[in-house]
Image: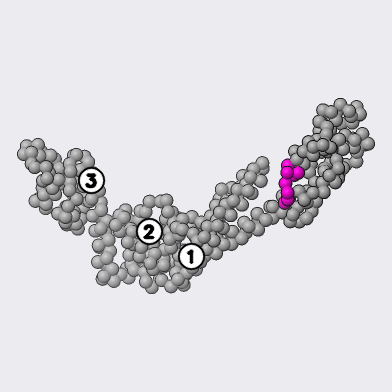
Amino acid sequence: MSVGAIICYLKSLSDDEIISINKYWTLNDSNKNEFKYTLTQIDEQRDPKCSRVSVLVNKSSCLINNPAFFCKVCKQAKPVKNRTELMARLRLSSFQCQECEQKQISVLREESIKILRNFISDALKKTDYFHRLSYIDKLILLTMLFDNYQEKKPIISSDARLNITGSENVDIPALSRLVKIGALVKIVDLPEEVAHAETKFHESSLTTVSRLRRNRYMPRSQRNQFAIERGIYFSLPLGFNNSAEFIEKIYNDIVSGGIAANEVTDLKRMVIDMRIENFYRLIDHIAHDFNLEISNSVPLSALLSHLAERYPITKCYYTFHRYAKEVVLYMHKNDPPSYSRCHLFTKFVSNYT
Ligand SMILES: [Zn+2]
């Protein structure tokens, strides 16, 4: 082969073995993309004492004076170990060795991790909001943090259903207020640089995993360790070292009952809102059970507010059932005009209360 090739012999070899190996690496004179001899031809011509060329080839490597055989980063010569590698290398115009590629991936990975960590630390930077927390804010925070809170993990993932008190009408304004104060931080969209780092981190994890595939998979937890989950995070206020300290403080504040008169009104309102929502659910249930149309009217809203403030829902459940039955009977007997049918249930229950 006349392309400036150097054949390296990795072990001491006999002259006959060297002849076989040299034939192995020889390219066709007319076509440099082909080898001059097939393995069968080399073996047929070999000395009987000499091993088969497929075994011998492990004792050699081949280097060609061509940019594809020198790493563009570390400049080191990188010979190939077999014909497939040689052909693949000849098709390249430049080459980077595996060690340099791995090093580059690690550097990129470290940089991405740093960007992701900085982003989370910045987003959850402590602010001075503790004095602004009301009794209800503390109750809501305690509910969310008490079980199983993990630092730097969202307390509500973006794909999870929001459920703190059981009433969205209570939960949504309560959360908005906590976000406004700074106790909660929403992480939904990442800034461009951070999103880019996240992609790079993910890619580097996949590359590392494919390298490791033969031995073992990189554990999922390790891959996800630095990924930023979307959702609502808790951010500690200034003056607290950790969440346990904070939880203990708000817990003590709640049980010691340091609650102002206006906060008692707010708390009552919150509980009534929760109950009203449950009453609406009960109405849906009754409408479905009795195949009744119940209009979502102003009188119904007034009726449910009135009931939610005064009666337990269990008592109303039986009352609603009774009147739903009466409405059905009434419609059967009297055949009222269609426009009035959807108001009958509210009318019947209102007359009773
Ligand atoms: Zn290199």
CB-based contact (under 8 Å), mark 1 and mark 3: no
Could you tell me how far apart the alpha carbons at marks 1 and 3 are, in whole angstroms?
42 Å
Identify the residue at horizontal 19%, vertical 50% (top origin): 296
**Looking at numbered disc 2 in the image, what kind of residue is underneath it?**
Thr
Identify the residue at horizontal 33%, vertical 58% (top origin): 171
Compare residues 180 and 278 and report the one nearer the observer.
180
Write down the region rendered in magenta: 88-96
* Rendered image: mark on residue 296: none
Q: Provide the secondary structure element on which disc 2 rests.
A: helix
Is 168 positioned to the left or the right of 318 in the image? right
Could you tell me how far apart the alpha carbons at marks 2 and 3 are, in whole angstroms?
28 Å
Q: Residue 186 placed where, x, y %? A: 43, 61
**Looking at numbered disc 3 in the image, what kind of residue is underneath it?**
Asp
Is 47 positioned to the left or the right of 317 in the image? right
Identify the residue at horizontal 20%, vertical 43% (top origin): 287
Mark 1, residue position: 123
Mark 3, residue position: 284
Q: Provide the secondary structure element on which disc 1 rests.
A: helix
